Amino acid sequence: ESVDKEKARVESDRSDLDRRNQILRERVHTLEDVKASAEAAIAKLEMKLQMADQTHELHLRDKELGLNDRIRHLESTVADQKDREKDLLKEAKRQQDELEEKHAAELKQMEDDIRGVLTKARREKQDLQQKVADLEGQLGEMQQ
């Protein structure tokens, strides 16, 4: 029963870690979508620059620079998110390893405890068998 509880707790911990990892992946995908959208906007602006006059071109270049700054910021944010995801995955793995080690030690202790109880029960059984044999011997002597 205790082993089942431990297994359920491990499963719950793993489920929680999987859920957290999924949330991080979704956040990274969202940031990548925003980056792709910004890159598409830059491509559209570059086409307009070719058809616009010099004044309009300068105005669009200013916008392009702003978008480039935003893209650099988004790229940095995406990289930071990926780094955080890696760190969280490492931490999750470390915690999972710790839990597995702890559970393995607990299981070994349980096995040792069970072996001890079985050994004691075997000794008691042998003692009782010896007492029965002694009593049967005494009974046999008394009957003679």
Image (tube, rainbow, N blue to C red):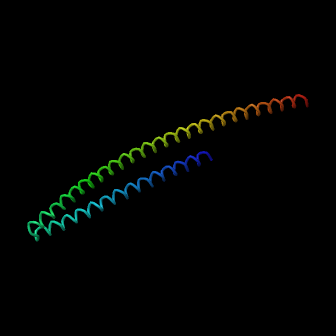
Residue 125 horizontal/vertical position (percent): 73, 35
- Residue 33 image offset from top left, x and y in percent: 30, 62
Furthest residue toward front = 55
Residue at the spot 22% in from the left edge and 62% down from the top edge: 39
Residue appearing at x 27%, y 60% in the figure:
35
For the C terminus, give its image quadrant: top right
Please state the horizontal and vertical placement of residue 8, each as a whole percent of the image. 55, 50
5 is higher (above) or lower (below) than 38: above
Q: Nearer the viewer, residue 100 or 60?
A: 60
Q: In this rendering, would 4 be left or right of 93?
A: right
Closest to the observer, 43 or 92: 43
Depicted 38 relative to depicted 133: above or below: below
Q: Nearer the viewer, residue 88 or 1?
A: 88
The x and y percentages for residue 95 are 45, 43
On screen, residue 22 versus residue 109, left or right, reads: left
Farthest bottom residue in view: 51
Q: Residue furthest left?
A: 54
